[in-house]
Structure formats: structure tokens, C-alpha cells
């Protein structure tokens, strides 16, 4: 499996590091980026780097598109020499399979992915969607690339990637907001900032770990830690009075709507 990364920014570097950590030979990976700084960073991992995308993709079985969505159309359209034996794995947010297909040779196998920021620390959550030209070997290969940055899940239809964007794509920011305000509230209640930060982050981490390891739904976990007339109940009642569950549902609907709008915007050639 030889992989060429188009763009060697944050997401590509996380995937490359993860692939190397998982035992892939550095000689099987190349990256192209116009930035000298990014090329030097990629080269320091032991892989070969190129300034020109066309040179990087020559020998590759898999081409990972890891540039900003705003430039994806021009980057893909200017690729010459890409052929339908190569699997295209796109991590560019909002770039649809239909857009990619219109810019690439006919019958090009394409896997569109929606990763999230925790991929940068190997704890990402990526949803993948494959077009008709993708075979079982391609599915396995795409999975292996994205698993380098965390967990993966396949979705059966592409529209679901807008929901994925609303849940896990934008999701880290919702948790950051919650943590930010818990830290501030802890300080208001008399803790120093470091202590409040440590308490909040470990609580977020512990709650996520517990929820992942439990066979119970998260609602049951919440009920289990809410004693009648206790402190947790007092806090949760306040959140309910402020309609926090409705606000969360509206927030995800807004992210979903914006995701569909961006797909239209970035898809224009
Ligand atoms: N980072 C995340 O958490 C995250 C999460 C979900 C999805 N994604 C998706 O992943 C993709 C990459 O994001 P990122 O955060 O890695 O962005 P990034 O750090 O900006 O990386 C993109 C890289 O592409 C380079 N580039 C610019 N023009 C190019 C060209 N013509 N050919 C090849 N490379 C070129 C950029 O170089 P310059 O800096 O010189 O422009 C930069 O090094 C985006 O489409 C984004 O939607 C990222």
C-alpha cells in the first residue's frame, strides 16, 4: 500500500504519524505541499516530499486529499496523471463525492471522510462514505488510513455525513464550550484556575471513558449519578430550566444546515 498525501498540514501529518506508529514503512508514504516549512516537517518523519502534487501521486495506490476545502476544486482539477486504479481518500470537509467525481476520471474509486480535530492526538472519530467504484480492498485500505487517527465508522448514504459533521465534526467545540464554562464557574466558586481546569478536564475524560465502557445508555449513567434532592439533581434541574437539551438539539440542526450550505459552496468549480 503506497500512499501520497496532497497537502501536508495538520490532518495529513496526524495520519502520517499514526500510519508510521502502526508499523507502515516510511518508504511507502510520500507527501506534497507548496509550503517549504510543511515539507520539512513531513520529511523529518522519514517520508519523501514533493513540491508538485503530480510527482507525488505517480507511484501511489492511494491518494489522500488533505487540503482546505476552499482550494480542493482547483487542486483536484489540476492533478494530471491520476487514474482510476488509484483510490482517492478525501478528508476535505464539505467536498461531495459528486464534486470529486466531476473533477476526476470516470470510475475513480473515492472514499469521502469526515474526521474531527481529536485526530491530531490519535483520538479522532471519522465517518467514511464510499462511491460505487470502491471495492473491498479499497474499503480496507481507506479504513486503515483513517484508523491511524482514531476510530472509524462507515455511513450508508452521503447525506448522513452532514449529520456526522453536526455530531462529531463540530462536536469537540461543544465539549470545549462546556469545559470552558465549567472551569470559569469553578473559579467563581473559589478554586484556582489550575485546579478548576484539572478537575474539569479529568471529569470530561472520565465521563467519556465510562460512557464508552458501559453497556448502559448514557441516560442511565446520568440517572445513576443523580440522587434525589442531591447536588447533581440541583445542577441538572437548573440546566433543564434553561432549556439546555433544546439548545443542544438546535445547535446540531444549525451545524447540519451549514454543512449542506458549505457543500454547495465548495462544490462549485
Ligand atoms: N484539522 C482538523 O481537525 C480537520 C477536521 C476535519 C476535517 N479536516 C479537513 O482536512 C483538510 C486539511 O485540514 P488541515 O487542518 O490539515 O489544514 P492545513 O493544516 O491548512 O493543511 C493543508 C495543507 O495543504 C497545503 N496546500 C495548500 N495548497 C496546496 C496545493 N495546491 N497542493 C498541495 N497542498 C497544498 C497547505 O499549505 P499552506 O499552509 O502553504 O497553504 C497546508 O500545509 C481540510 O479540508 C479540512 O476540512 C480537518
Image (cartoon, helix red, strand yellow):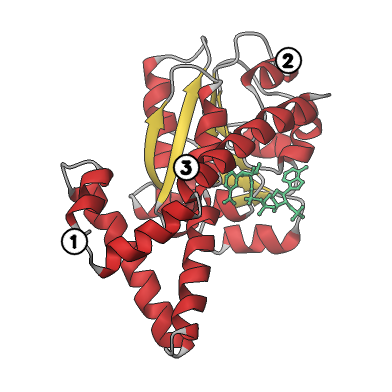
Classify the position of the C terminus by image quarter.
Answer: top right
Q: Nearer the viewer, residue 179 or 147?
A: 179
First reached walking from the N terminus: tag 1 or tag 3: 3
Residue 230 appears at what percent x and percent y? 23, 67
Residue, disc 2: 102
Residue 215 appears at what percent x and percent y? 15, 42
First reached walking from the N terminus: tag 2 or tag 1: 2
Residue drawn at the location 50% of the way across and 42% of the way down: 246
Residue drawn at the location 37% of the way across and 17% of the way down: 136
Q: Nearer the viewer, residue 131 or 210?
A: 210
Identify the secondary structure beneath mark 3: helix
First reached walking from the N terminus: tag 3 or tag 2: 3
Identify the secondary structure beneath mark 2: helix
Q: Nearer the viewer, residue 142 or 185?
A: 185
Whether residue 172 is visible, yes or no, is yes
Alpha carbon of mark 3 to alpha carbon of mark 2: how far? 29 Å
Q: Which mark is residue 75?
A: none
Residue 54 appears at what percent x and percent y? 72, 34
The quarter holding residue 99 reads: top right
Q: Is mark 3 within 8 Å of ligand 1?
A: no
Residue 177 in the figure: left or right of residue 221: right
Q: Nearer the viewer, residue 120 or 75?
A: 120
Counting other residues with Cα less than 10 Å from the Cα at mark 1, is it few (<14), some (14-19), or many (20 or more)? few
Residue, disc 3: 28
Q: Nearer the viewer, mark 2 or mark 1?
A: 1
Counting other residues with Cα less than 10 Å from the Cα at mark 2, is it few (<14), some (14-19), or many (20 or more)? some
Residue 120 in the image: above or below residue 185: above
Counting other residues with Cα less than 10 Å from the Cα at mark 3, is it few (<14), some (14-19), or many (20 or more)? some
Q: Is mark 2 within 8 Å of ligand 1?
A: no
Residue 174 appears at what percent x and percent y? 52, 54
Residue, disc 1: 227
Amino acid at each position: 500500500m503506497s500512499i501520497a498525501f496532497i497537502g501536508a498540514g495538520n490532518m495529513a501529518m496526524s495520519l502520517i504519524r499514526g500510519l508510521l506508529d502502526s508499523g507502515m514503512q516510511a518508504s511507502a508514504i510520500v507527501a506534497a505541499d507548496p509550503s517549504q516549512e510543511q515539507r520539512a516537517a513531513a520529511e523529518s518523519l522519514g517520508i519523501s516530499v514533493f513540491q508538485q502534487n503530480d510527482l507525488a501521486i505517480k507511484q501511489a495506490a492511494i491518494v489522500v486529499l488533505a487540503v482546505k476545502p476552499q482550494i480542493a476544486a482547483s487542486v483536484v482539477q489540476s492533478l494530471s496523471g491520476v487514474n482510476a486504479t488509484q483510490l482517492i481518500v478525501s478528508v476535505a470537509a464539505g467536498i461531495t463525492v459528486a464534486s470529486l467525481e466531476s473533477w476526476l476520471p470516470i470510475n475513480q474509486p473515492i472514499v469521502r471522510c469526515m474526521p474531527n480535530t481529536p485526530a491530531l492526538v490519535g483520538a479522532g472519530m471519522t465517518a467514511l462514505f464510499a462511491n460505487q467504484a470502491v471495492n473491498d480492498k479499497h474499503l480496507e485500505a481507506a479504513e486503515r488510513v483513517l484508523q491511524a487517527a482514531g476510530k472509524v465508522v462507515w455511513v450508508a448514504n452521503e447525506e448522513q455525513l452532514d449529520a456526522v459533521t453536526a455530531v462529531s465534526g463540530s462536536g469537540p467545540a461543544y465539549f470545549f464550550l462546556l469545559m470552558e464554562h465549567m472551569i470559569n464557574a469553578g473559579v467563581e466558586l473559589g478554586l484556582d484556575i489550575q485546579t478548576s481546569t484539572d478537575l474539569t478536564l479529568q471529569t470530561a475524560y472520565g465521563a467519556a471513558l465510562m460512557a464508552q465502557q458501559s453497556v448502559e445508555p448514557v441516560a442511565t449513567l446520568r440517572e445513576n449519578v443523580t440522587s434525589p434532592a442531591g447536588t447533581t439533581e440541583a445542577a441538572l434541574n437548573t440546566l433543564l430550566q434553561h432549556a439546555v437539551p433544546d439548545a443542544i438539539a438546535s445547535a446540531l440542526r444549525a451545524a447540519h444546515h451549514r454543512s449542506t450550505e458549505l457543500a454547495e459552496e465548495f462544490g462549485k468549480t
